[in-house]
Amino acid sequence: MADTVKMWHYKVNGQSYGPVTATELQRLAKLGALTGCLVRTDDSEKWVSVEKVKGLVPPKSTEAMVEARAPIPAAKPKIADNNQRVLAEQTAHTQATDIGRQKSKNKKSNRSMFLAMFAFSVVIVTISFFILPPTSSGVPRTIQNTNPPVPSSPRLTKSSFESMVRGKDGDGVRSAVGSPNKTQTLSLDEYWYYDDIAIDPLTGKPATAQLFFPGGSIGGGCSAINWL
């Protein structure tokens, strides 16, 4: 079985080259390209001076010194590949930084929007609390008109009101005192109600008049007036 060919590495100005065969290493040494350089075998991590390797560096001669003036390295370092790798790493780092900045910007924007909406809600609730009257539970409610309906005509005395509407049909009553606050139909008869239309002379308080139209307000006139 043939022995495995031993391969060599050499270092020039701190840059490592190889692997090369022993024959190639001897050729470089003969040219003087390895003067003062370090070498090691493929199966060793220890670098040694090329002059200490027996049989590797031939005796110096005038021819070798002349040829050594133009040393030719066995292989060129892959500078282009290293530059491309560094450029790719820088590009990836820049992209990652930009993405992180964009995420941070979006978070700040969302936070500002939330705070603005919250502040607006607080203002609305505060205004409602001071403007709207509270219910029994303390919660503000919509303002409703709780005032009694305004009578269709100025408040009268009971007697004056009765003289204005008695015996008149519906149109006549409307012409005299205005439209009723509400009406009620029972069978063919109608009842009209005028809330707080007159003043009770005994109590001095407003009184509601109930007008009775037998057979309806169109046919017969007001035949009875009740005070409520």
Image (cartoon, rainbow, N blue to C red):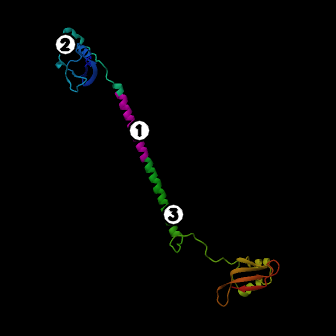
Residue nearer the viewer, 156 or 130? 130
Question: Could you give the CA–CA distance between mark 1 and mark 3, rounded to whole angstroms?
Answer: 44 Å
Image coordinates for residue 143, horizontal then vertical, percent: 58, 71
Residue of label 3: 124
Question: Start and end of the magenta stretch?
Answer: 82-104
Q: Name the quadrant containing residue 227.
A: bottom right
Per the image, label 2 sits on a secondary structure element best described as loop
Picture residue at 47% right of the left edge, 59% below the top:
118
Q: Which mark is residue 58?
A: 2
Image height check: is 51 above or below 186?
Answer: above
Instruction: Tell me the residue at 64%/77% (across/down).
Output: 148
Is residue 180 visible in the rendered image? The answer is: no
In this rendering, the label closer to the viewer, 1 or 3: 1
152 relative to 227, above or below: above
- Are discs 1 and 3 less than 8 Å apart at CB? no
How many discs appear? Answer: 3
Chain-order first, disc 3 or disc 2: 2
* Residue 108 at x, y percent in the picture: 43, 50
Q: How far apart are the two marked residues, 3 and 2, measured between alpha carbons?
A: 98 Å
Which kind of residue does numbered mark 3 sit on? Ile
Distance between mark 1 and mark 2 Cα atoms: 55 Å
User: Depth check: 214 or 17 in front?
Assistant: 17
Which label sits on residue 95?
1
Q: Main secondary structure of the magenta part?
A: helix
Q: Which circle's residue, 1 or 2, is located before the other in the chain?
A: 2
Mark nearest the camera among 1 and 2 is 2
The N terminus appears in which quarter of the rendering? Answer: top left
The amino acid type of the residue labelled 1 equals Gln
Seen at 55% across and 70% down, the residue is 141
> Which part of the image, by quadrant, shows the C terminus?
bottom right
- Is the residue 69 above or below the residue 177 in the image? above
